[in-house]
Image: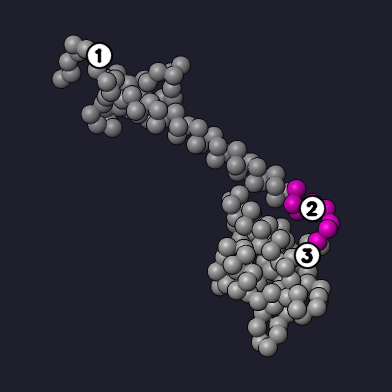
Amino acid sequence: MPPAPRRPAPDLLLPIGDIARRAGLQASAIRYYERIGLLPRPARRGGQRRYEPSILEWLSLIALAREAGFTIREIRQLVRDFQPGSRPAARWRELAARKLTEIDTTIQRAERMRAVLRIAMDCGCFRLEDCRALLDAGPLEGRSPCVLPAQPSAGAAYL
């Protein structure tokens, strides 16, 4: 869990609604992040949560990690016991290496799917079963392996 915030002057602390608005989140998401240990427990005034403006940096880090495909568990590993201003720990490098491998695998799958879709756009088969070449083969030097092109040439007739 991130370290507890130092206690600035009470007039510098912001209510959860202001933090949520600035971060583009629902207040319930911020409370959830607190509950699961992604954010420290905030100061309270009159029973209401009050945050330092620097909590927005933590929320930005969490948002960036989520956009990059990190799970909540992985994000917890990233922020747990992390001291602001310190360099990323070994766990960051380990997590980053794992995530980079995952991303590379996802990219390879996406590139394969792109190739299949491009082939499918040129496919003239009537049924998927007739186009086993599409599913089994990759692009052949940019050409479709399908026997029947999608756009017949002038004068061509298909059964």
User: Which residue was labeled with disc 1?
Assistant: 153
Alpha-carbon distance for marks 3 and 2?
11 Å
Which of the two marks, 2 or 1, is nearer to us in this view?
1
Pick the front one: 125 or 27:
27
Q: Earlier in the sequence, mark 1 or mark 3?
A: 3
Q: Which mark is residue 81?
A: 3
- Please name which of the two marks, 1 or 3, marks the residue nearer to the observer: 1
Circle 3 sits in a helix, a strand or a loop, which is it? loop
Q: Earlier in the sequence, mark 3 or mark 2?
A: 3
Residue 107 x/y as whole percent = 55, 37
The location of residue 61, given as percent across then percent down, is 68, 57
Specify whether 66 is left or right of 91: left
Which of the image's four quarters has the C terminus? top left
Q: Label 2 sits on what residue type?
A: Pro
- Which contiguous range is marked in magenta? 84-93
Looking at the picture, does residue 123 appear above or below residue 71? above
The residue singled out by tag 2 in the image is 88
In this picture, residue 152 sits left or right of residue 101 = left
Who's the residue at 64% across and 46% down the image? 99
The three-letter amino acid code for the residue at tag 3 is: Asp
Q: Earlier in the sequence, mark 2 or mark 1?
A: 2
Q: Nearer the viewer, residue 64 or 69?
A: 64
In the rendered view, tell whether residue 66 sits above or below residue 140: below
